Image (tube, rainbow, N blue to C red):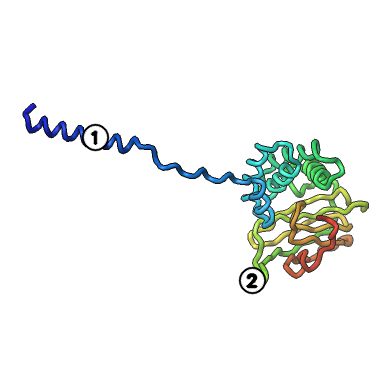
Amino acid sequence: MRPSLALLAIGLALVVVAGCKRGGEAPPASKAPAAVDDVAEAKKALAVANWAGAAPHLRAALQKDPNSPFLHYNLAICATWLDQSDEAVREFEWVVANALSDSDEAKTARKWLAARKKLGTSTETAADPWVGDSGVHGIAMWGEPGQPSTPLSRHQIFLIGLRATPTKAYFREFRTDHSGNYEFKNVPAGTYRLSDTVGPDPKWRLKVTLEPGQSLLLDLTPENGVKRRDDFPDLK
């Protein structure tokens, strides 16, 4: 190697060594990311009916606390809203097996599972023994105070028979179409609770009485929401 090239090679080697020394220095210590409180985040999402946002936090929280009825029950509720029926069945079955038998959570879980077993995966079927000639239909619309109401697309609506009545075992669910329309058909005459959730924080909780052959038009709006009308205030 010629002297000039040798000097250049030595110079490059020194630069590389210096660079390695600098690169090998330990980086400044960074703060560890704050731990996520999955239960708190789930509660925040549940409070605004953000089912898709709550579900991942509930699942993560269950990894740490697998024996929590609160977590299993609310994950089941989220799963019903998200059309994840297998998860809903699994979580409701856990609630039935582990929660206090006379708790509202266990009662709701048993009713949901019984209705699903009777109807399969469909909410309406000709084989259903609970078939009548009445019904209730309308449009579900919602808007925050001061804002215009808009149709609720794919919003879940429940029609539930009341205790101590002939229709006490009746339980149906229906998802609104993209224009917010809902309709329960072939319903036996009787008295029911019409709501948009079997869990906490409903928008509506109305008592509906259907006469034989009646097709009741009942639009769901802020005007008959729970803040202005709650026919079942004891259900918390």
The residue to which callout 2 is attached is: 147
Q: Residue at x 82, y 63 (%)?
A: 230
Q: Residue at x 81, y 50 (%)?
A: 171
Q: Observer-nearest residue: 153 or 147? A: 147
Indicate the amino acid at tag 2.
Gln
Helix, strand or loop under label 1: helix
Quarter of the image with the C terminus in it = bottom right
x and y percent of residue 137 in the render? Answer: 76, 62
Q: How many marks?
A: 2
Q: Relative to residue 115, is residue 193 depicted above or below?
A: below
Q: Identify the image quadrant of residue 162.
A: bottom right
Q: Is residue 25 left or right of residue 148?
A: left
The residue to which callout 1 is attached is: 16
Judged by depth in the image, the label closer to the viewer, 2 or 1, is 1
First in sequence: mark 2 vs mark 1: 1
x and y percent of residue 41 in the render? Answer: 64, 50
